[in-house]
Image (cartoon, grey):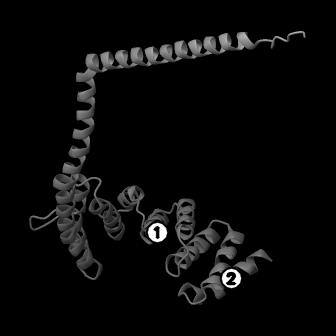
Amino acid sequence: MATYKKRGAKKSVTTSKENEEVKESTTAEVFETLDTTASKTEEWVVKYQNIILTFIGLIALSVLGYLGYSNYVLVPKEREAVSELNQAQYYFDLAVNSVEADSLYSRALNGGEGKYGFLDIIENYKGTPAAKLATYSAGMAYLNTKDYNNAILYLDQFSADDVLLSALSKGAIGDAFAQLDQKEDAFDYYVTAAQINNNMYSTPKYLYKAAIMGASIGKIQQALTFLKRIEKEFSESTEAELVGVQIGKLETLLK
């Protein structure tokens, strides 16, 4: 009977051993590489540990420094600024309802009785909420004392998240430009003030002012649009009682 030798039987055993040897060799190389990399990393850490520790220390100090600055410098500074602002605002409020308004506005701006005025607060408490409000109030004080250039200067610097105050500040700049007979600028600021926020108080107020100023500089169609918007959207506002006559006049001009 003829014998049949299984092809590759012996070779299969050899190959298997060779594969295992290759795997073992590869694994050894991997571990050797990892060991070498780890050693190099350890050497790098040892070599630069002072720099690393210094860097970590600086980060920690920065965080602690910021917290310390917030708690022991910023917070007391803001409280102090509010205290100063209260007195300046007190003079301002008195001025609004007084026949001796100019002298009271001057005190509100420049201080009195050992307290800061708006200008001092702006200078000494920069970045605080009190300084921002002082900037707005200073602009309004200048507007009420007819110092229109300074009114524009301070009101233009004012910015706040409060949309109503933002609208009022832009509208007040429009008033200052109107008093300086810079009608185009006044018109632009009235329009901006009306667009900042849609509410029953500032929106119809500045739409009406924009319409009147716009009509005076030949922007008749825009003025009509503003007046009709007041009539339609803000019918319960004070300005709504005035628009009927103005609309009639402007429509006559367009015929």
- Above or below 50: residue 137: below
Marks 2 and 1: which is nearer the front?
1
- Mark 1 residue type: Val
**Callout 1: 10 Å neighbours few (<14), some, many (20+)?**
some
Instruction: Give 101 or 165, whichever is nearer the viewer.
Output: 165
User: At 40% across and 62% down in the image, what residue appears?
Assistant: 160
Mark sitting on residue 247: 2
Q: Quadrant of the N terminus?
A: top right
Viewed as shown, does residue 175 lie left or right of 14? Answer: left
Q: Give the residue pinned by disc 1.
A: 163
Of label 2 and label 1, which has the lower sequence position?
1
User: Is the C-beta separation of discs 2 and 1 under 8 Å?
Assistant: no
Q: Is residue 125 above or below residue 29?
A: below
The image quadrant of residue 86 is bottom left
What type is the residue that disc 2 sits on? Ile
The residue sitting at 48% across, 15% down in the picture is 28
Residue occupying image coordinates x 69% and y 76% = 224
